[in-house]
Image: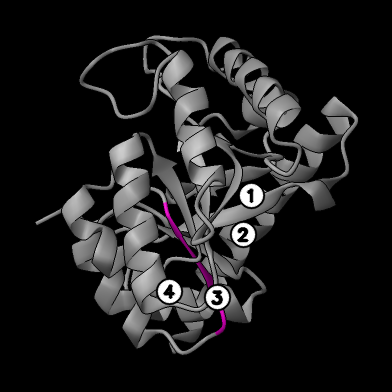
Amino acid sequence: MSDARRDEIAGNLAAVRARIDAACAAAGRDPADVTLIAVTKTYPASDVAHLAALGVTDVGENRDQEAAPKAAAVTAPVRWHYIGQLQRNKARSVARYADVVHSVDSERLVEALATAAGRQRDTPIEALVQVNLDGEPHRGGAVGADVDRVADAIAARPELTLRGVMAVAPQDWEPAAAFARLAEVAARMRAAHPGADLVSAGMSGDLEAAIAHGATHVRVGGALLGMRAPLR
């Protein structure tokens, strides 16, 4: 592994950790309650190895066609988080390696993912309901009462474990307003499903606002690993 690349990632990691610590201090929270997910989309498996050596063992991927071979290539003990939009026809592949799926947004996807998990693994997949905060139909995520229906469907399947909610702040919203709305949805879900206590929110540009509104998991790519190469 390249010492220069590891040093670069280590420096970026220290800066991100400092931001998380400062955000937690401002919110009166314990930094230990916020998990950093390193988003490694477009970055090589060697970067995942560097991150694992530096103590970052939660790794997020957006696209199955990249994530599946990368997960197979990485020998370090990491937890794989699938955070991108998930099509039902990819559920079988994702179920092979994903420990956590953040983007469950329909009852049909619940069925596909649970069926795939039951056939391919001995442990349940942890599942989060992706919430569409602004109702835009082109955006992924469940809206309104659909959030509750998807959560109930996950909770009813032994192949899955309902863990909470995930959202991306719409580009034309103030992040604080978006994450405040997500916090309301998360509280409602916890009332119905007490074990669903994870809130996946915040990325490189808005993690402070997410932490202020209760995020337990932040998904950081560019601030950790630098500018991404163009997608092919």
The first of marks 4 and 3 along the sequence is 4
Q: Nearer the viewer, mark 4 or mark 3?
A: 3
Write the start and end of the magenta stretch as one range: 77-82
Which SS class for mark 3?
Answer: loop
Return the residue at label 2.
Answer: 13
Which SS class for mark 2?
Answer: helix
Q: Are marks 4 and 2 in contact (CB under 8 Å)?
A: no
Q: Can residue 24 be found in the magenta stretch?
A: no
Q: Which label was assigned to residue 78?
A: 3
Q: Amino acid at mark 4?
A: Asp
The first of marks 4 and 2 along the sequence is 2
Q: Spatial distance from mark 1 to mark 2, Cα to Cα?
A: 5 Å
Q: Amino acid at mark 3?
A: Val
Return the residue at label 1.
Answer: 16
* The image quarter in which residue 26 lies: top right
Colour basis: one colour
Q: Spatial distance from mark 4 to mark 3, Cα to Cα?
A: 12 Å
Confirm whether residue 227 shows in the render: yes
**137 with respect to 7 (left or right):** left
**138 with respect to 147 (left or right):** left
Return the residue at label 4.
Answer: 47
Return the x and y of residue 61 as percentages of the image width and height: 37, 58
Q: Amino acid at mark 1?
A: Val
Q: Residue at x 28, y 72 (%)?
A: 68
Of 71 and 211, nearer the camera is 71
Q: Are marks 1 and 2 in contact (CB under 8 Å)?
A: yes
